[in-house]
Image (cartoon, rainbow, N blue to C red):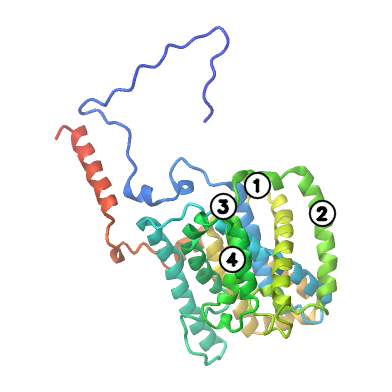
Amino acid sequence: MFDAVPSPGHHRRPLPPAQPPARGVPGPRTPTRAQERQSPAERPGRQRDAFFDNAKYLAIVLVALGHSWSAIKTDNRVLEGLYNVVYTFHMPAFIIISGYFSRSFDMRPDRLKRLITGIAVPYLLFQIAYSLFRRYAGQADDPISLVSPYYLTWFLCALFIWRLTTPLWKVVRWPLPLALGIAMAGSVTRGLDDNLDLGRVLQFLPCFVLGLLLKPEHFALIRRRRVRILSVPVFAAALVIGWWTVPRVDGGWFYRQSSAQDLGAPWWTGPLMTLAMFGCALVLTACFLAWVPGRRTWFTALGAGTLYGYLLHGFVVKSTLYAGGFDLALRYGAAGSVAVTVLAAAAVTLLCTKPVQRLFRFAMEPEMEWAFKQDAAELARERQRKDREREKVGV
């Protein structure tokens, strides 16, 4: 709300000093424990930022498109080139935003609880669910492993590790150069993807650290009209370069998962490609965000459910793959590719909706109060709240 400004020629008396409420008269309402556990954006009276919700929704649509295109891009150089462009920046964009919203993370007990219930528990549940689904629907005999993320679950594993390291990045002098150095080291270390998918954890780390360093004015800077106009030729050039890379660049580089040696390249290409991919991701992410609307749109509310869309759309993609749906799409050429694109976007949109969130909240956002000891500071705040309530009623 804007403060009311008196019109010229009218004067207001100064407000009297604040007085404590009399007995029996309710005073200012103190936040409940549930409200204290909520993030500022989720508390009553505070609105979510439409720009970031829009960006998260559009990024998750690109993720779903990329996973769907992976099954039909064979022998289609245009689609494969577009796939390479999307894979250059869609996860970096999502990770940068995740880092931006992790800036306030510290080792406070309530935030550690949210880290466990919002990331660690969903990782365990979906790691098991995807493993069972793969075994019985995909006819695979691989054992269930909690330390080898399958398919989509690597992101939850990575986000858990990145967020735990957030306090460290706040105290080092040069966080982004250090993160880039770690990523370059990861690009020449073999076998990292065998345990917790550490190859991706390390090679995507600079994107998360960059998000921690960003401020609102940085996002305002890239949303200017000049940047939006400049992004058009940049994206056009990226599409041409993506088309050019198809027969010349190993697609494994775009996943940021394997070492240079595992990709059959000399070790020294790992650090160079790490820097090149980070630079390209940064430019394309800026161009992408420049076109994200800042106003509320029909899909703004879906931005709050992107984790649901992310974790659940994998079952749709894999089910289609196991049922031969992508083989059917390949028979129809360009029309089949368009159909897959539209259906993938529609499916992930549906999975971000409120009914789906309510249905799967038990797995994505479990309460689990029974699993944690109550924090001493929280107990003290609760006692103070009860004392104030007794004073109000004259007890």
Q: Circle 3 is placed at which residue position? A: 301
Q: Position of residue 170 (x, y in %)?
A: 51, 55
Q: Circle 4 is placed at which residue position? A: 205
**Residue type beneath disc 2:** Val
Q: Position of residue 390 (x, y in %)?
A: 18, 37
Residue 337 image label: none
Of discs 2 and 3, which sits in the foreground?
2
Residue 78, image quadrant: bottom right
Kind of element beneath mark 1: helix
In space, the residues marked 4 and 1 are separated at their CA atoms by 20 Å
How many other residues sit within 10 Å of disc 4, few (<14), some (14-19) or many (≥20)?
Answer: many
Q: Position of residue 85 (x, y in %)?
A: 75, 67
In space, the residues marked 1 and 2 are separated at their CA atoms by 20 Å
In space, the residues marked 4 and 2 are separated at their CA atoms by 28 Å
Kind of element beneath mark 4: helix
Residue 100, image quadrant: bottom right
Q: Position of residue 180 (x, y in %)?
A: 63, 65
In space, the residues marked 2 and 3 are separated at their CA atoms by 27 Å
**Callout 1–callout 2 Cβ contact below 8 Å:** no
In space, the residues marked 1 and 3 are separated at their CA atoms by 24 Å
Q: Circle 2 is placed at which residue position? A: 232
Q: Circle 1 is placed at which residue position? A: 218
**Residue type beneath disc 4:** Leu
Q: Of the two numbered discs 4 and 1 on the same chain, state the one appearing first in sequence.
A: 4
**Residue type beneath disc 3:** Ala
Q: Is residue 102 visible?
A: no
